[in-house]
Image (cartoon, coloured by chain):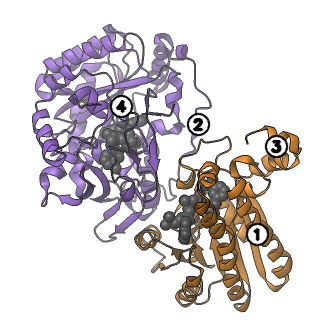
Chain colours: A orange, B purple
Amino acid sequence: MKAVVFGGTAGIGRAVAQRLAARGDLVFLLGYDEASLARSAADLMARHPQQARVQWALCDMESPSGFAAALDAADVALGNFDAAIVTAAMFATQAELEADVELTRRLTTVNFANTVTFCEHARKRLLTHGGGWLTVVSSVAGDRGRKPVAIYGASKSGVSTYLEALDHKFRAAGLWVLCVKPGFVKTAMTANLKVPPFAGQPDAVARDIVSAMDRKRPLIYTPGIWRLVMLVIKHLPRFVMRKIEF
Amino acid sequence: MDTLTGWGRLPEPGRELLDEDFETLTRGAVLSRGLGRSYGDSSLPANASDRVANSRFANRIIAFDQSTGVLRAEAGLTLVNLVRLMLPRGWFPPVVPGTKFVTLGGMVASDVHGKNHHREGCFGAHVRALRVRLADDRIVECSRESDADLFDGCLGGMGLLGHILEVEFAMHRIPSPWIWMERERVSDIQAFLESIATAAPQWPMTMGWIDCVKRGKGMGRGLLMAGRWATTEEAPTRHPGSPHEITMPMELPNWALNRTTTGFFNAGIFWGHVRNRASATMAPERFFFPLDAILEWNRAYGPRGFTQYQCVVPRAAGPPAVYEFMKRLTTLGAASPLCVIKDCGPEGRGVLSFPLEGTSIAVDMPVSADIQRVVNGLNEFIISVGGRVYLTKDRFTTAEHFRAMEPRLPQFQALRAKWDPTGRLRSAQSRRLFGDKA
Ligand SMILES: Cc1cc2nc3c(=O)[nH]c(=O)nc-3n(C[C@H](O)[C@H](O)[C@H](O)COP(=O)(O)OP(=O)(O)OC[C@H]3O[C@@H](n4cnc5c(N)ncnc54)[C@H](O)[C@@H]3O)c2cc1C
Ligand SMILES: NC(=O)c1ccc[n+]([C@@H]2O[C@H](COP(=O)([O-])OP(=O)(O)OC[C@H]3O[C@@H](n4cnc5c(N)ncnc54)[C@H](OP(=O)(O)O)[C@@H]3O)[C@@H](O)[C@H]2O)c1
């Protein structure tokens, strides 16, 4: 694989970049913090001697005007990438979002509108390169309208719906769209939250993601148990959902 | 309320912040911590509202020089990660403690020692440079050449001089990824000390396990382990791989580990190794980190928690002092399934580093109503022979005893006054032992 990883400087994205680099795939990092990009690239090279040169470019999910240039840079560095992996996103608690309408606007824009915009850029390139992988980390939070993730969940729900349709539409053309729905994963994003049962580690989640890409799957829950958890939650009647705080 | 705990599982109120960007995280922080493998309160805040930065997510390797082995990484890089990455490439850290679940930052802040202390000194002896965030939020790079006093203070300084952001040290080249190990059964403490002294010049790595429960004749019976890296001829051709680990499935009740069960446990270990002498090649993870085979084994001590008493008896005090210490241990009733003896070489440059030339003894003890009396009793003896305790294990030493056993304290406090004049950096331990304000 020749993979662009948007968000490869932290958490799940970084773990995916490590997994790919370890088995000799080429990676190109995108992110919005220069120091963090340079360090993460150096780390990939130090850990995996076969990675002679890991390159990166600045790309801010809040400024879609930079998406094309960032992907151009990736194309040049990798010689036409065949995988785009998006983990970059924002998170805020429902309380923080309710207290700050501007934060709500920013988060929903980054997680939905700009993520879809980035994917559209990537999709077009992948199709011109003859196909490949478009892997986006959505969330189980998008599976059902729930009190603690009303806004964040809605932004992820939009992404999941978009990815499902992309898979229907472009699989025949050789585009393998993967929608990743992590449950709770122990990363910086969730460091301030109470850890629920079935919490996962980024490395195990990355393993699931890479294996789903290899198998060209359209959708995974990770850790796997969350498929069952969400199955139950999706079938709870509304009167129950109104009562519980989950 | 949120709490934080060390390996001994006695909580203190507080919470920690985690992020890949440890450098930013430490701005305004008063304490840093890694994997919380220190037993006592070294990594716990003095105050519930103190800003505590956890380095765990900052684990990037910044540079590795294949020709010299010099490695520079962020403080949160874990030993398990480093060992599994570098062993197949023919490199091993110069010094490792008895568990691989520690961070580089923690290894520096405790200036850890390993089975090779008599040869290689502490981890700090191999550190070339540190990048440190000071109490006033400035960031400095220190080494033996620049700001050497800060550098020396950070080695074993328990995080009290600054937040260690990056560590540069030299890895060792190893001839094979296997250890050649010899194990000898020893009948009592006298024989034990003789054997460990004989082994020291021949073996780069030594350590012993002794039975602290057995009294009278055979007190201090145990096993002596000695090892070195296997040569290419001795080593099996396959890679040792990573051992299978199981997790302690639940917290055991408080009574599960008591005098009788530990006695049986010890007899099992002692008589289980029936042959007097055995040798074999061994996977390095099993040799260096035997306790890691059961993850979260600290839960075996139950909800009351436990502590470890680790002290060093100076060589000058001689074997009789070690014998006397063992006697005190047994009369004070400090039963333990785990009593580890190590041979320490000369003191290093870390201002507050633990080891000094002599014999280090480490005993795990469940926390009981009696614990303060036991620790006080042991400390009184240790002070009388000119020894000291290991801060990273300590939870119960009193400020008074600490002052009595630590002639280097004024020097360390002077360093703190210089680098942290407003006294911002502190921990629950520094509050207890140094009299820092809460
Ligand atoms: C089973 C077991 C066996 C052990 N065997 C040995 C042994 O053989 N030899 C030995 O020497 N030790 C041994 N230890 C102790 C262990 O090596 C030390 O406690 C080590 O410091 C733990 O590292 P950590 O990352 O968990 O640090 P923590 O426990 O999180 O912190 C320990 C201390 O380091 C400070 N610190 C941590 N990170 C930073 C940072 N980035 N900047 C500044 N200060 C920091 C903390 O403030 C605290 O004072 C053992 C521990 C266990 C549980
Ligand atoms: N953790 C969970 O429990 C969980 C559960 C379900 C779904 N998810 C999803 O999984 C994905 C990865 O999250 P994570 O847990 O790995 O969190 P993380 O460690 O915080 O990583 C988030 C990544 O997004 C980047 N990012 C944030 N805002 C950005 C912006 N404006 N422009 C560019 N990059 C930006 C961050 O870059 P910097 O490092 O430079 O800040 C970081 O690399 C996210 O889509 C998240 O919604 C996570």
Q: Which residue is mark 2?
A: B247
Q: Which residue is mark 4?
A: B41
Residue B306: quadrant of the picture: top left
State the CA–CA distance, disc 1 to disc 4.
Answer: 48 Å
Dot 1: element = loop
Comparing B149 with B102, the one in front is: B149
Give the amino acid at mark 1.
Arg
State the CA–CA distance, disc 3 to disc 4.
Answer: 43 Å
State the CA–CA distance, disc 2 to disc 1.
Answer: 31 Å
Q: Which residue is mark 1?
A: A215
Q: Is mark 4 within 8 Å of ligand 1?
A: no
Q: Reply above or below: B380 against A148.
A: above
Give the amino acid at mark 3.
Met
Dot 2: element = strand
Determine contact: label 1, label 3, CB under 8 Å.
no
Nearer to us: label 1 or label 3: 3
Q: Which residue is mark 3?
A: A241
Nearer to us: label 3 or label 4: 3
